[in-house]
Image (cartoon, rainbow, N blue to C red):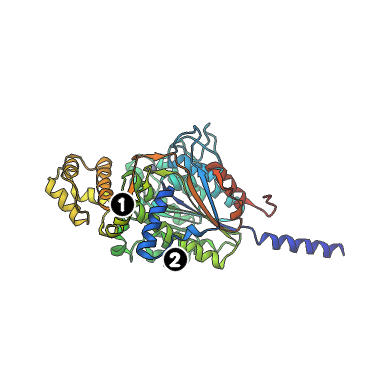
Amino acid sequence: MKKNFFISLLLILVLSLSVLATNVILFIGDGMGTHQISVANYISEKLYNEQLCFLSFSQQSFVNTANASGSITDSAAAATALATGVRTNNSVIGLDANSRVQKNLSEKAKEKGKAVGIVTDDYVTDATPAGFVAHTSSRSNTKEISLAYLDLQPDVFMGMGVDAFTASTRRKNGWDDRDLLKELTDTGYSIAYNLSDLEKTSSHKVAGFFSSLDDVFAKEATTNIQPTLADMTKQALKILSHNEEGFFLMVEASYVDRGGHYNDVVGVVHNVLTLNNAVKEAIKFLETNPDTLIVVTADHETGGMSADPATLPEMLGKFEDVTQLPLDIDNTIGSSPSKEWVKEVFRRSGIKNVSEEDLQAISILSPGASRRTKIGQAITKYTGGAKFTTTGHSAQNVALYAIGQQSELFPSKLRNDELGQILARIVTDDGVLNK
Ligand SMILES: [Zn+2]
């Protein structure tokens, strides 16, 4: 009798466990404020008859993005808040404001026997993915961040930046003599360098090193070679779902931030659409795996961008004209260009009516960030659709969209560190979660 009672109790426990979020998928649009989403959704609805998929998620909240000193965050402090539930200072990865190590979501998931995935369209050693992997005083400690991947051993990680893992670059930088690619292979990783490698692998442990993922317009030309963010997300889900204990997956779309720094509305919109396509893969996964939570949010806003209702309609006719990002235009312009050459490069990139004043200003600048910003601003002047108030980050709240198991746990207003704490509770939940 007593034994039967315990068996029933066990059954109830097992059944209640099955409705908790076993799999947590966190999407981060780097620099993706609410107006970045609004303008991208306007373009998506008007040009492609499709609302951004995450706008219909059941739970929607606002997240305060401040750092430990209460000021405007960078991606390092923001990723640390989301990954560890603790606010820190800018540039710091995985440590609190007093330099103490704080366990991140990946480590907490591993302790629970869950699989871990890190996917980005930027360098895998960049600040946002680093926040979910490493503990170091500076986001520029690429050596430490690359080694942290070897320590953590995520089941899958993908993005750009193979160089930091090669013996030749490490030697050249005076870091060490280690061949991390070999060490990854020795610890069971299969390494993918293109989409075909990624689709072919049957390994449950995969490192993907790709190139030019930020080149959103090169997609058609290189689609057979390099995966999109959606391709990476789809393959990561396939690999991670082998683990019966579930998984934690972080997926970053990074160019919303860079486009914001360059005040380039076209690049921003393209990357929000890229993120949207990746989220669609997660929704497909949720449909067959209801024990999954999907969260879409941002680390901070970049550019102080606001939709410009007066010029949005004309953006519809110009958005698809633009075929290059500021980075590519900057490279093509090269050093010491004539004003005529600058005009010609803009023309070839689909950007018309650049003022004589802007052509002149661009022709006297050297290649690099400030010229790319001038180029981005010229793109936005051409297409319209938005206005920017800074080339840095802003203090704006960002949005959070959640769907699936336990999505109701997010309050309508929360801080970035609280968001990290709630995610940690969900990831480490053993079935006795108090709401
Ligand atoms: Zn930034």
Q: Amino acid at mark 1?
A: Thr
At horizontal 39% and vertical 50% (from top left) the residue drawn is: 36
Q: Quadrant of residue 9?
A: bottom right
The foreground one among 174 and 258 is 258
Q: Are marks 1 and 2 in contact (CB under 8 Å)?
A: no
On screen, residue 100 versus residue 158, left or right, reads right
Residue 216 numbered mark, or none: none
Q: Amino acid at mark 2?
A: Thr
At horizontal 57% and vertical 65% (from top left) the residue drawn is: 289
At horizontal 24% and vertical 47% (from top left) the residue drawn is: 378
Residue 201 numbered mark, or none: 2
Q: CA distance from mark 1 to mark 2?
A: 47 Å
Residue 181 visible in the picture: no
On screen, residue 378 versus residue 86, left or right, reads left
Quarter of image, ligand 1: top left
**x, y percentage for residue 68?**
51, 34
**x, y percentage for residue 71?**
46, 34
Q: Quadrant of residue 8?
A: bottom right
**x, y percentage for residue 264?**
31, 48
The foreground one among 298 and 244 is 298
**x, y percentage for residue 294?**
53, 57
Q: Look at the picture and state if 157 lies above or below 65.
A: below
The foreground one among 73 and 135 is 73
- The residue under label 1 is 311
